[in-house]
Image (spheres, grey):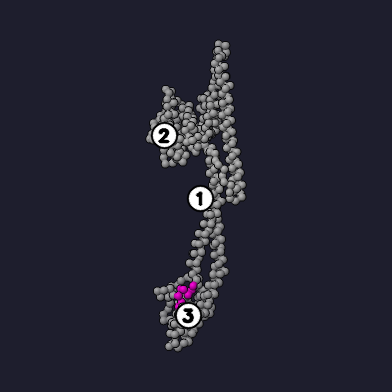
Amino acid sequence: MSRPLTLFTRTGVTLTAALLVFVVFCIGTMVTYIAIPLARQGSDDLAALMILSARTWIERPPAARPFLEEELLSDYDLKVSLAEKPLPCSKTPLPYLIFLEQALERRLGTPVPVRKGEQSTPWFCADIPMGGQFVRVSFPWSRIGAQPPLALILIIAAGAVVVLLTSLLLVRRITRPLARLSEATTHIGHGEILAPLPESGPRELVDLTHKFNSMAGELTELVENRTTLLAGISHDLRTPLTHMRLALEMLTPDKTDAALIERLRRDTEQMDQLIGYALELARGLEVHEAEEVDLREFIDGIIANYRRPDTVIDWEPQSYCPVSIDTMAMQRVLINLFDNAIRYGGNKPVTVRCCRDSDATVIRVLDRGEGIPESEREAVFRPFHRLETSRSRRTGGSGLGLAIARQLSDARGWSIELLPREGGGTEARLRIPVAATAP
């Protein structure tokens, strides 16, 4: 049996179990020190009354017995008569009746069983030996008065309800602020800016919320500063880089080493690409308003830019697929995935598919390249991480494309994973939950 996972469930179960143990202890104490002694005393008094009634009845003349019988019935709810046949063997195992049998045996010196009578209403009978005969003394269920089973059931039921409601109330009061903190951390992880949480409740939770608000403010400021820094540095680097490229274009191969010029040109192009990725990441971290688009037409527009003689993309638009997304972030993610599949696909066609179910919209980008080892499928999402063979600098990869795609997706509640494709190659699967699309 699995253990409950949430703090609410675990705390509720713990409190409920502890309080139920306390209720059981209280019931046991009441039964041992109150109910049982009272039942013994009451049964002893009833036994004395039954023996006295039987003795008085047997000593009366037959003509006077009816008057005594009426008096005992009206005053004490007792019926007295001569036992003409043995009592049935049925026995009701009530604690009170057991105590009554013990009391009768102590007073008479012989066992006297108490059995249920034959009346339609629940009466109990005891044949008391008196004067060489057996006098049957009967009393109704109401004569006992106490109903221990019903009392225990009511006490346990009431205790369980009170304990459960109290536990839920206490646990809810404790876990609600923690649930707010957990939800807030999720939003902050997605790059959202939140208003400070209310600092109310017990002192410990107030302190925790206050520290969380301070931390959230610092994180928000840090992200904003990082975005500004990336954008500023990337923009400022573009100016000297442009000057270097102009200087290279002005050099003449006949006076300068042509191989050196070509190498410098490739280096400047690579630097320009890295700066472009940095600017892309800086713009991607910004929060933009979601737009409702037809994802089918949106993907078709991006793929149109890749239709070249040396590039084949197998894409067949499916049915209408409305989503509400950050279009700028989605465009950068898809471009990175398409570039990655084309660059490492071994010059083979790239397949793109889009489908939607009840939970999410899924975009699949499939290539027929060499594939990615299982141990590297998460590592390639780290910045500047490359595989030793196909994914090297010689192929033009910067090591930032998948990292940027993952960061953009995580910030918006999307998910990206790399899977092995049947028959060879890699499948990049972008999953957009329904909660993150809100069409």
Nearer the observer: mark 3 or 1; the answer is 3
Q: Give neighbour class at mark 2: few <14, some 14-19, many 20+ (Cα, 10 Å).
A: some
* Above-or-below relation of 167 to 428: below
Please say if the residues under marks 2 and 3 sit with CB atoms less than 8 Å apart.
no
Q: Is residue 353 magenta?
A: no
- The tag earlier along the polypeptide, 1 or 2, is 1
Mark sitting on residue 75: 3
How many neighbours does mark 3 have within 10 angstroms: few (below 14), some (14-19), or many (20 or more)?
few
Task: Say what secondary structure mark 2 lies in.
Answer: strand
Q: At label 1, which amino acid type do we have?
A: Ser
Regarding residue 380, the answer to whether it shows in the image is no
Quarter holding residue 228:
top right
Q: Nearer the viewer, residue 95 or 296?
A: 296
Q: For residue 379, what is the image quadrant?
A: top right
Residue 246, disc: none
Which residue is disc 2 drawn over? 294
Residue 202 drawn at (x, y percent)? 60, 51
Q: What residue is drawn where x is 41% and y is 31%?
A: 297
Is label 1 or label 2 in front? 2
Q: How far from the left and from the top, in percent, is residue 108?
A: 52, 80
Q: What amino acid is at disc 3?
A: Asp
Residue visible at 46% across and 78% down in the picture: 77
Q: Is residue 144 magenta?
A: yes
Label 1, secondary structure: give it.
Answer: loop
User: How far, Cα to Cα, is label 1 from label 2?
Assistant: 43 Å
Q: Is residue 113 above or below residue 225?
A: below
Q: Which residues are magenta?
A: 137-145
Crowdedness near tag 1: few (<14), some (14–19) or many (≥20) residues, C-alpha within 10 Å: few
Q: Position of residue 124 (x, y in %)?
A: 45, 75
Query: What residue is disc 1 on?
Result: 2
Q: Earlier in the sequence, mark 3 or mark 1?
A: 1
